[in-house]
Amino acid sequence: MPLMRDKIIGHDLERLAFRFTMLSETESVQCQISDAAMDELAGMQGTESSARQAQFLSLRETIERIASDLYDEAPRFQGYVVRIFMRHLAR
């Protein structure tokens, strides 16, 4: 079952990833995409932290589709976080 769009949390400087949530029926699913993966999708490198939200918004549909696909393949347990890395883009 595909995940549905939920909230934007924002850029995590410590993890170098952009965090967001999606919904599986009524359950909130934590998701994140690495800065490197987001830059790869955008065809650029070294995006500033302050520009990450705009970058996410421009790529949101693609990122959410990847997150939903990964969630469908993942083991289901409480607290699972969908993490998108560069290796997931070559699918």
Image (cartoon, rainbow, N blue to C red):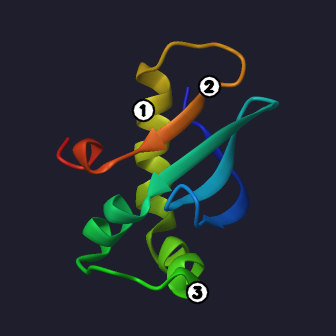
Label total for image: 3
Quadrant that contains the C terminus:
top left
Q: Nearer the viewer, mark 2 or mark 1?
A: 2
- Identity of the residue drawn at 53% across and 86% down: 51
Indicate whether 77 appears above or below 24.
above
User: Mark 1: few, some, or many residues within 10 Å (few <14, many ≥20)?
Assistant: some
Quadrant assignment, res 2:
top right
- Label annotation for residue 80: 2
Tell me: residue 65, above or below residue 52. Answer: above
- According to the picture, the residue beneath numbered tag 3 turns out to be 50
- Compared to 90, does 53 lie above or below? below
Question: Can you name the residue that lies furthest to the left here?
Answer: 90
Horizontal and vertical percent position of residue 44: 26, 81
**Amino acid beneath label 1:** Leu
Q: Counting other residues with Cα less than 10 Å from the Cα at mark 3, is it few (<14), some (14-19), or many (20 or more)? A: few
- Residue indicated by mark 1: 70
Task: Describe the element under mark 2 as helix, strand or loop.
Answer: loop
Which residue is the extreme one toward the front? 14
Q: Which of these two is toward me, 3 or 77?
A: 77
Q: Nearer the viewer, mark 2 or mark 3?
A: 3
